[in-house]
Image (spheres, rainbow, N blue to C red):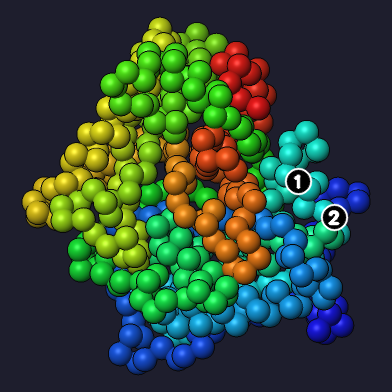
Amino acid sequence: MMENLLRNKVDIVTYSSKMEVITYSSKLVKPSIPTPTIHRFRNISFTDELAPTINVPLILYYNPPANGVDDQLGNIADHLQVSLSKTLSEFYPLAGRFIRKLSLIDCNDQGIHYVHGKANFKLSQILEPQKGFESNIVNNFLPCEIGKADEVDDPILSIKVTTFECGGLAIGMCFAHRLSDMGTMCNFINNWAARSNGEYESGKHSPIFDSALYFPQRGLPELDLRVPRSSVDVKNAVRRFLFKGEAIRDMREKVGFDGNGSRRPSKVQLVVALLWKAFVRMDEANNGQSKASFLIQPVGLRDKTVPQLPTNSFGNFWGLATSKLGPGEGDKIYFEDFFKILRDSVKKTAKDCAKILTHGEEGYEVVINPYLESNKNIADTEVNFYLFTCWCKFSFYQADFGYGRPIWATTGSLPVQNLVIMLDDCKGDGVEAWVHLDEKSMKELEQDSDIKAFAL
């Protein structure tokens, strides 16, 4: 098996003089059972229409299997491919192609992009920042460019399986956002993992294709993040800031939480508040007064509508919570004030979501209007626009493909500025914030007193 892979070597990615990721093979994996003709074409919903043109990157890292590392690349990659093909028979739209001009998925079983790779270094070399970790390294474990999405030749799902010298494993996935939010991604991962480890139960993680029923297509504009198809010439800085559980507790004390009856502040909103305050403070220092600031946070809809939607509903089920500050408004307020603005915004959005399915056009506007407002502010040069998205509490840390649960999960380095992606840390009580800024702003952020006090 290894000899065949070596003969098919197609690419070598180098990010230091000693460390390489070698791609041995690339293929299209199709559903194990052909998709019935009756399911050939599937309309997207208006919540799918609103999603940005981007591949959402997620990478799961695993310790070496207990049974050793001999011929590991071939054995593991082949095993995962077989279970993947079976999973695609249920998640068949992921093996199709998006037809943009018709706003539908052609479920033609063309297949997902599946790559085998091998790193000539150990997994431990990228796990800790003090060992030389660089955020752009992780993109070498992804199967495709993050911006290559939504064209007729672009796979809706791409996967790369990379093994390390030590026998460790990275499974990198790129899901086209046009068809998937993190809830959909995790349901797919759970299904695939269960098939791989022999614990699959029929129907447990099966998708329900009901998004177009709840949110019929309306011809709406996408959230325009202006992601380029290639990141080659993109110059931005990405850094992972780690806020450990102890730092989260200190921030809770700073906003006045004493644990005596009051609701515990969300660790995510605390981190968002700290970073937003730092961004505003940087703007003030550079310009004498901060610009208007507009911040959005995706909010999941499945558990907030009345009635609630099934957790395994397939597609995009998220709205936007918006928070705003006028010019100079953030210059004289404190950390706890930023936190309250964010908390109230998310609380209001969650409350409004309850009427989405029961109030007709008024309910739909709860979802649609924040997108339209966001696109307006993205294009306004007099407004600083920030996107914070939270992947905490999702189930990908439970994904056991037969080799144990992941020891780490990361996003990729996206060719976007003013973006923050937040994940649980390995212990679950802290937050990893993957911050995307221009290079000058990143250097300033690293020197911010609050960031230095709370983040690693």
From the viewer's perspective, is 22 left or right of 279?
right
- What residue sits right under mark 1 in the picture? 126
Q: Quadrant of residue 71?
A: bottom right
Do the residues bearing badges 1 and 2 touch, measured as CB atoms within 8 Å? yes
Q: In this view, does 281 lie above or below 132?
A: above
| SS category of the residue bearing label 1 | helix
From the viewer's perspective, is 338 left or right of 77?
left
Residue 180 visible to the viewer: no
Amino acid type indicated by mark 2:
Phe
Q: Position of residue 155 (x, y in %)?
A: 53, 72
- What residue sits right under mark 2 in the picture? 121
Say few, some or many: other residues with alpha carbon within 10 Å of mark 2 (under 14 / 14 to 19 / 20 or more).
Answer: some
Q: In this view, does 430 lie above or below 278?
A: below
Residue 450 visible to the viewer: yes
From the viewer's perspective, is 6 left or right of 231?
right
Q: Where is residue 58 in the image (x, y as percent from the top left)?
A: 57, 55
Amino acid type indicated by mark 1:
Ile
Residue at image position (54%, 34%) is 430
